[in-house]
Amino acid sequence: MLSVWFRVIRIRFLLASVIAVSVGLALNWWQNSTIEPFDALLTFAGVMALHASVDLLNDFWDFKRGIDTKTPKTKMSGGTGVLPEGLLKPSSVYRAGIAFLVIGSAIGAYFVITDGIIIATILGFAILSIYFYSTKIVDSGLGEFFVAVKGSMIVLGTFFIQSGQITIES
């Protein structure tokens, strides 16, 4: 059963978020020669939760809209197949997606309290784009654009959490 959840979360694609946080940490180390380990671990946890959320909600909405059964399956499209194959209930996948969104948002809220409006702006963008990614953003043709912006915001947010500033280099 755990392997089915790893499949629907798209565990391999979480590497993109690991890389983005790592780049933010590396930039901070390069500029400031310091890393706050607690904040770094919490950043990884929050970003991973938000990434898992968007993948789960994407699978749910694509299944509900019938996209998974109409799209030829490739490594990058056609969904995970978990819902069309009946391996999990759609309601379970949706609830897990919302749970990860709440977890990631709660971690983000901690950073809003400790680091302020810049993190609030990044977190607000993340929450809205995660929830509406599969239902509005992709339909408007902006899916890839939002993915690129998300990656950049993860790097900038990580750097800001560590350094308290945004620089040209970051």
Image (cartoon, rainbow, N blue to C red):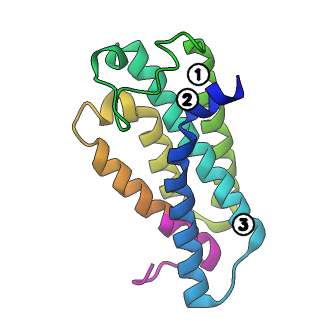
Q: What's the magenta region?
A: 155-170
Tag 1 residue = 93
**Mark 3 highlights which residue?**
39
Q: Please name the residue shown 29% across and 34% down the image.
A: 138
- For the residue marked with disc 1, what is the amino acid? Val
Confirm or deny contact between disc 2 and disc 1 (CB under 8 A).
yes
According to the picture, the residue beneath numbered tag 2 turns out to be: 8
Q: Nearer the viewer, residue 167 or 34?
A: 34
- Secondary-structure class at tag 2: helix
**Looking at numbered disc 3 in the image, what kind of residue is underneath it?**
Asp
Report crowding for label 2: few under 14, some 14 to 19, many 20 or more residues within 10 A (C-alpha).
Answer: many
3D distance between C-alphas at marks 3 and 1: 29 Å
Q: Residue at x 62, y 25 (%)?
A: 4
Q: Is residue 163 above or below residue 53?
A: below
Furthest residue toward left: 141
The residue at the far right in this view is 38
User: Relative to residue 142, is residue 98 drawn left or right?
Assistant: right
